[in-house]
């Protein structure tokens, strides 16, 4: 992999990033290499088209949402620190290396992970998943072979189950509560695509 | 043939029903115990009998003396074998019944222990009667008849998702753990047997390979025992699937080790080459078994695609294909258990999409029934075989075996967990490790394998069998009984009985997509990436082949949603005759007739039937009662006096019309009824917990659904069937006047707030009818929510 120290010099603010996100040096290096691979025209920043070039994402029903999650509202490009910060949400829970006193809560805590997922549903960032937003997600996931009424009834039922304050939308707290009902292994806490010993590209 | 009957009079009749039941069972057991030796005794006489009979006939032909025509004749050996089999099955089932009559006992002692005790009793009785105990745990009977139903039941209903997520851990425990156990126990036993050189005992003659063989027999965790015990303790899904998965997958290892050592025990040495071949053999056995199972599973799925016209034999295909998969695998000495699991798991999603709901229920209940009876029989037979089996007790050997098994298991689990935790995201805690180690129960498979050993080749077979039985007893009794209090003591997370909600399902799928996307961004081909690829392949090619018609395109979420809606509909029908309804519409019912939705029904004003003050209700009820009486009179006889205009009657003429319509609708609906499921026992008993699956409604109350209560039957045989449309049409016609949205309840044919009086009277009338026929509605069943919010 080359001597990490010299490659690490390429990464701006590596130490800070590691502190903030909890990634190890090896992790960070791998991410940097991936970043550079995606950055076809070597500008040091990623654009939506660069993400779109990834084959698997094009087939993914919520691919465009994931891509837009990397871009803060108004921004058109993503630099490496932002890239890493978003991916830091998916670090496994158990390996929090450093915890500054200033941080209230590590980036990859369960709440932050759920918040990230919540924001993918809630595109207009109003803090609630409205019926329309839920319908959009369902439509994206279920494709064209489902009728409108079926979608409506599923969305209706989902909102009824989760919506405790009867405002016809799912707030973040209600969202959290639904996920806690059953200890389903597939919560965001389970994911780490970044284990250094696992396969590469 | 002297007929022996045991006459027993139970001393002192118990006053309470459970005790009487128990006494009855004891009597039955004793009777059966007496008949069995009768049967056993008659078997050697059969051929002798026939000869003498022939002679008699020949004699008679010669002498032509007239014999009295036998009016009543006993010919036991004509039906002997099936009769005995049935008797055993009956005994097993009655025992099961009996244990649940004594609730306290079944909560302290796991069923498996009680059954072994019963087996001991029956075996003891047979021995006391001086008869030959039938070789009940004969390996052929066990492996070909008793084991497959249990494994098929486990495989068909295997929760695929947790299994696949933990498959690495499970395989580690199953393969590496079992091999470790086998060698540790075998090796140390040999070492122990070799010590005490000053005092040569029979133990010295044991060879290393024999010990290793014994170790491999005793080290496999037994799925039957695990199932039986874990069923009752309700631990969380992760631990359950870990221990249970291990018990299923270690079959391949056991088969290979067993055959390896049996082969080479005669020769006396095992070379490295043999070891290498053993490893290859393991791969062949395991993967071959899975392949055979998968092939049969696909065949079954494909066959079920065409069964839409012969729904009655659909369950048969599932059973026969699975059994053939098992037999085929056994033919090639592959792992039959893995074949069965693979077959069930592969065929299930496709078969369930193709078969009717009733077939699904049939499959479920048949599997549960057979596996339940099998399990009971296995434990009873264990008891009987213990009494009978050739024993040779050797203190050293047996105690060392028991201790070594425990120690090996603990060390194995701890060591493996240490390694596994490096790769796992959700780590296994110490508590988890303890439960996994403690849950390693041995069972009848070990005994059968030991029984298979050839006495001539293995001089110490009897000692082996004794030791195996002791270990089995120890694990089942001691560990089985204490695991429940230990689980409580350690506060291990229990299984959460929460229903799967649609939110969870949506979010699970959403997360899958999300994580796949993130993996793609990072360029990491992990778990999700491959799962996604598999799903895509499945959707594109496989589903089209194996699922009939339209449903091949149905996304998983929709299927799940349908299932949930059906479940709710079933629940409603079961629990109160359809007064309370799901608040959303199942897509199987034609949706074209549904009016646009209204805002959520939480506000009381939305209800189409507003509440009435108490006084008015009473009044209405009184009027209603008297009116009903009047109707009866009028219909029965022509009475000049009632021709006078009745002031009460005018206001309620339309009520009567509606009542007539109600009755007609009721009749029509009854004609097209499709009752959906069998009412279930109270949900808490362990057997019922087994019988009840994730797809079953959780709360069943045993309310009788009387005929006078209009019930809703939804035809679930196929989506959008003409029946369901008809029902909706009926309602539409009944609701011609009202526009208040559609009500699925025929008696509430009128819904609107235009006629609050009548609507309420019909409701009261219905309530009255129900009061007369039902034990009483529950509090919240009185709310009449409109069908659509």
Image (cartoon, rainbow, N blue to C red):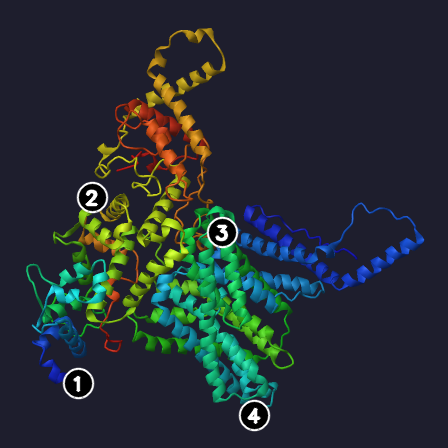
Disc 1 chain ID: A
Task: Judge the density around disc 4: few (<14), some (14-19), many (≥20) Cα neighbours within 10 Å.
Answer: few
Q: Which mark is residue B197?
A: 4
Label located before the other in sequence (3 or 4)? 4
Q: Position of residue A136 (x, y in %)?
A: 20, 51
* Mark nearer the viewer, 3 or 4: 3
* Furthest residue toward bottom: B198
* Furthest residue toward right: B63
Q: Position of residue B185 (x, y in %)?
A: 48, 81
Q: Position of residue A137 (x, y in %)?
A: 21, 53
In space, the residues marked 4 and 1 are separated at their CA atoms by 61 Å
Disc 2 chain ID: A
* Mark nearer the viewer, 4 or 1: 1
In space, the residues marked 3 and 1 are separated at their CA atoms by 62 Å
Q: Which mark is residue B463?
A: none
Q: Quadrant of the N terminus of chain B?
A: bottom right
In space, the residues marked 4 and 2 are separated at their CA atoms by 82 Å
Task: Judge the density around disc 1: few (<14), some (14-19), many (≥20) Cα neighbours within 10 Å.
Answer: few
Q: Which mark is residue B314?
A: 3
Q: Which mark is residue A2?
A: 1
* Mark nearer the viewer, 3 or 2: 3
The residue wearing badge 2 is A166
Which of the 4 quarters of the picture holds residue B587? top left
> Is A154 on the left or on the right of B403, as rendered?
left
> Is B54 on the left or on the right of B267, as rendered?
right
Q: Is residue A102 visible?
A: no
**Disc 4 + disc 1, Cβ < 8 Å:** no
């Amino acid at each position: 992999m080359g001597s990490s120290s010299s490659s690490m010099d390429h990464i701006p603010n590596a130490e800070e990033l590691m502190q903030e996100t909890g990634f190890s040096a090896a992790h960070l290096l791998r991410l940097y290499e991936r970043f550079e691979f995606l950055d076809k025209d070597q500008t040091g920043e990623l654009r939506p088209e660069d993400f779109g070039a990834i084959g698997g994402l094009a087939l993914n029903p919520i691919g465009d949402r994931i891509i837009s999650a990397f871009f803060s509202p108004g921004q058109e490009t993503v630099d490496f620190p932002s890239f890493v910060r978003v991916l830091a949400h998916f670090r496994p829970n158990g390996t929090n290396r450093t915890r500054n006193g200033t941080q209230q809560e590590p980036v990859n805590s369960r709440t932050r992970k759920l918040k990230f997922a919540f924001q993918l549903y809630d595109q207009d960032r109003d803090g609630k998943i409205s019926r329309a937003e839920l319908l959009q997600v369902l439509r994206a996931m279920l494709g064209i072979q489902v009728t409108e009424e079926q979608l409506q009834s599923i969305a209706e039922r989902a909102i009824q189950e989760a919506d405790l304050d009867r405002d016809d939308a799912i707030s973040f707290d209600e969202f959290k509560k639904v996920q806690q009902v059953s200890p389903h292994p597939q919560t965001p806490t389970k994911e780490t695509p970044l284990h250094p010993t696992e396969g590469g590209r | 043939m002297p007929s022996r009957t045991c006459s027993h009079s139970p001393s002192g009749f118990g006053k309470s029903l459970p005790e009487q039941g128990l006494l009855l069972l004891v009597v039955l057991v004793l009777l059966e115990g007496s008949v069995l030796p009768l049967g056993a005794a008659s078997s050697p006489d059969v051929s002798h009998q026939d000869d003498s009979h022939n002679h008699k006939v020949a004699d008679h032909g010669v002498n032509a003396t007239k014999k009295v025509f036998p009016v009543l004749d006993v010919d036991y050996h004509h039906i002997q074998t099936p009769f005995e089999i049935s008797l055993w099955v009956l005994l097993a089932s009655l025992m099961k019944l009996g244990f649940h009559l004594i609730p306290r006992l079944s909560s302290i002692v796991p069923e498996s222990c009680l059954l072994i005790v019963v087996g001991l009793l029956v075996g003891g009785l047979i021995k006391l009667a001086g008869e030959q105990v039938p070789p009940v745990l004969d390996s052929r009977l066990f492996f070909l008849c008793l084991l497959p139903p249990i494994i098929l039941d486990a495989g068909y209903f295997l929760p695929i998702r947790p299994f696949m997520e933990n498959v690495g851990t499970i395989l580690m425990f199953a393969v590496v753990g079992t091999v470790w156990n086998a060698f540790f126990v075998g090796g140390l036993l040999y070492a122990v047997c070799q010590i005490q050189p000053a005092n040569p005992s029979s133990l010295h003659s044991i060879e290393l390979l024999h010990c290793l063989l014994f170790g491999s027999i005793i080290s496999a965790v037994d799925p039957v025992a695990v199932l039986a015990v874990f069923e009752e303790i309700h631990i969380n899904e992760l631990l359950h699937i870990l221990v249970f998965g291990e018990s299923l997958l270690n079959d391949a290892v056991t088969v290979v080790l067993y055959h390896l050592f049996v082969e080479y025990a005669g020769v006396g040495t095992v070379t490295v080459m043999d070891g290498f071949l053993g490893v290859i053999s393991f791969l062949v056995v395991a993967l071959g078994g899975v392949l055979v199972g998968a092939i049969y599973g696909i065949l079954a799925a494909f066959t079920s695609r065409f069964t839409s016209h012969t729904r009655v034999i659909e369950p048969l295909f599932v059973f026969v294909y699975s059994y053939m998969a098992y037999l085929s695998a056994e033919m090639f000495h592959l792992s039959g258990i893995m074949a069965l699991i693979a077959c069930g798991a592969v065929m299930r999603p496709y078969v369930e999409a193709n078969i009717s709901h009733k077939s699904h229920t049939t499959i479920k209940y048949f599997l549960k029934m057979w596996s339940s009876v099998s399990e009971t029989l296995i434990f009873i037979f264990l008891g009987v075989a213990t009494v009978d089996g050739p024993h040779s007790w050797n203190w050293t050997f047996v105690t060392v075996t028991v201790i070594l098994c425990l120690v090996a298991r603990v060390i194995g689990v701890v060591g493996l967990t240490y390694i596994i935790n490096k790769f796992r995201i959700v780590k296994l805690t110490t508590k988890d490790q303890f439960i996994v180690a403690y849950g390693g129960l041995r069972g009848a498979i070990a005994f059968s394998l030991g029984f298979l050993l050839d006495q001539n080749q293995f001089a110490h077979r009897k000692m082996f069998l004794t030791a195996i039985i002791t270990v089995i007893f120890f694990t089942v009794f001691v560990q089985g009984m204490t695991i429940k209090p230990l689980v409580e003591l350690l506060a291990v997370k229990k299984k959460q009985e929460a229903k799967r909600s649609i939110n969870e399902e949506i979010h699970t799928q959403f997360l899958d997509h999300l994580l796949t996307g993130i993996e793609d961004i990072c360029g990491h081909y992990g778990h999700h990436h491959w799962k996604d690829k598999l799903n895509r392949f499945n959707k594109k090619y496989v589903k089209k082949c194996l699922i009939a018609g339209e449903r091949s395109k149905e996304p998983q979420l929709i299927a799940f949603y349908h299932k949930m809606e059906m479940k709710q509909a079933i629940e409603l029908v079961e629990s109160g005759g359809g007064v309370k309804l799901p608040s959303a519409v199942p897509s199987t019912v034609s949706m074209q007739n549904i009016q646009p939705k209204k805002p959520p029904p939480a506000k009381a004003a939305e209800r189409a039937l507003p509440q009435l003050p108490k006084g008015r209700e009473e009044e209405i009820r009184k009027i209603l009662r008297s009116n009903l009486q009047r109707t009866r009179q009028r219909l029965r006889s022509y009475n000049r006096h009632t021709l006078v205009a009745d002031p009460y009657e005018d206001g309620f003429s339309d009520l009567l019309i509606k009542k007539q319509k109600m009755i007609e609708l009721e009749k029509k609906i009854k004609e097209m009824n499709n009752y959906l499921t069998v009412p279930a026992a109270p949900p808490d008993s362990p057997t019922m917990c087994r019988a009840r699956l994730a797809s079953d409604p959780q709360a069943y109350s045993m309310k009788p659904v009387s005929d006078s209560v209009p019930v809703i039957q939804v035809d679930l045989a196929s989506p959008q069937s003409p029946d369901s449309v008809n029902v909706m049409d009926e309602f539409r016609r009944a609701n011609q006047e009202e526009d208040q949205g559609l009500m699925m309840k025929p008696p509430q044919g009128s819904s609107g707030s235009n006629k609050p009086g009548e609507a309420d009277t019909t409701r009261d009338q219905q309530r009255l009818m129900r009061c007369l026929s039902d034990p009483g509605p529950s509090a919240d069943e009185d709310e009449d929510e409109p069908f659509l919010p």
